[in-house]
Image (cartoon, grey):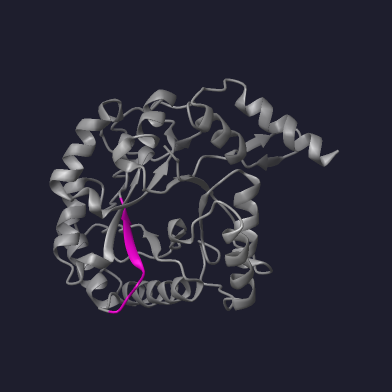
């Protein structure tokens, strides 16, 4: 089985998508996810079409398929919050702008956090999400909005299959909406990933596997059902290496891109952090847990610095 696996890479002002592709290839990825600007603010530089064309050329020479690339919408978007109308309509306009940037890049999937109801309750929060999506999505839109399942922390909406189904059912152009599953969020939200076949069957019966567009692969620092959302490196959390391998290599998910969002490894002496993806992907491809992962990552990047 050819695993479609990648990491969450950067999108710099200078090289943009070309830089993202170069970084992904350096980790051994055959897909990747990126923001199109900083996730915590609205600062955006125009898309550089030349860099995009060079990125396309580089992908054609590699194993990265353009259709598997994913953009992640910034965290500041909250289409569940109807308390502050200015914030709500800003989120709608900003998500519309991000979708246009995806279209210019030629990327057809954008992952969006459903948002938090900020005290209005889940029913009202989901009503706000549906209203926003119906304002955002048009019939000609090529970009699929992938609603990410959340852990249920605070007032997060979309923290189980039932809520995601309710939102999708309320959207007019349902073919433009998919789902992003996140293993840490699911585990922290209470799903038992040691019995993943049962979980996947539940998802298929309720929403449909045809709606599953991308999976975020993360271990969890928390006990199941904690609703805390704290990612851990692969095999170093409470989901466990074998359970995550089972998910990644599940035959029903062979065409679904898997994206690592695992924590960077810190070097406390130098006060810097290192990306783990190159070593986690190697471990995943071998299907063998590497207990020395952290040390190997530090030694590799320190040797490059010297």
Residue 192, position as x, y percentages in the image = 26, 29
In depth, the one of 52 and 184 nearer the eye is 52
Q: Give the range drawn in magenta.
A: 140-148
Residue 306, position as x, y percentages in the image = 86, 38
Asked if residue 46 is among those painted magenta in the image, a careful observer would answer no
In depth, the one of 58 and 199 nearer the eye is 58
203 left or right, relative to 47: left
In depth, the one of 126 and 29 nearer the eye is 29
Relative to residue 243, is residue 166 depicted above or below?
A: below
Across the whole image, how many numbered discs are drawn on residues? Answer: 0
Tell me where residue 237 sits by quadrant: top left
- The quarter in which the N terminus is drawn is top left
Relative to residue 208, is residue 284 depicted above or below?
A: above
Please report the residue visible at 30 percent of the width from the left and 58 percent of the height from the top.
Answer: 114
Please report the residue visible at 59 percent of the width from the left and 62 percent of the height from the top.
Answer: 11
Asked if residue 145 is among those painted magenta in the image, a careful observer would answer yes
């Amino acid at each position: 089985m050819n695993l479609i696996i990648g990491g969450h890479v950067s999108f710099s002002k200078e090289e943009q998508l070309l830089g993202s592709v170069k970084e992904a290839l350096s980790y051994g990825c055959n897909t990747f996810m990126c923001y199109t600007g900083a996730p915590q603010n609205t600062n955006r530089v125009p898309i550089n079409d030349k860099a995009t064309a060079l990125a396309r050329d580089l992908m054609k020479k590699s194993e990265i398929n353009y259709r598997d690339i994913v953009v992640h919408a910034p965290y500041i978007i909250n289409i569940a919050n109807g308390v502050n109308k200015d914030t709500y309509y800003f989120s709608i306009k900003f998500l519309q702008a991000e979708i246009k940037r995806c279209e210019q890049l030629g990327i057809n999937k954008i992952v969006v956090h459903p948002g938090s109801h900020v005290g209005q309750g889940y029913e009202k929060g989901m009503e706000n999400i549906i209203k926003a999506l119906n304002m955002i999505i048009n019939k000609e839109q090529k970009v699929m909005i992938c609603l990410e399942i959340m852990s249920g922390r605070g007032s997060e909406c979309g923290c189980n299959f039932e809520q995601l189904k309710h939102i999708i059912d309320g959207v007019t152009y349902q073919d433009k909406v998919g789902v992003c599953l996140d293993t840490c969020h699911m585990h922290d939200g209470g799903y038992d990933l040691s019995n993943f076949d049962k979980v996947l069957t539940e998802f298929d019966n309720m929403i449909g596997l045809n709606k599953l567009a991308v999976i975020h692969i993360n271990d969890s620092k928390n006990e199941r059902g904690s609703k805390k959302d704290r990612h851990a490196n692969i095999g170093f959390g409470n989901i466990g290496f074998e359970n995550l391998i089972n998910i990644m290599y599940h035959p029903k998910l062979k065409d679904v891109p898997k994206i690592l969002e695992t924590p960077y490894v810190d070097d406390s002496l130098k006060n810097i952090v290192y990306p783990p993806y190159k070593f986690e992907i190697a471990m995943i491809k071998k299907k063998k847990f590497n207990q020395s992962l952290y040390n190997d990552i530090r030694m590799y990047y320190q040797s490059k610095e010297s």
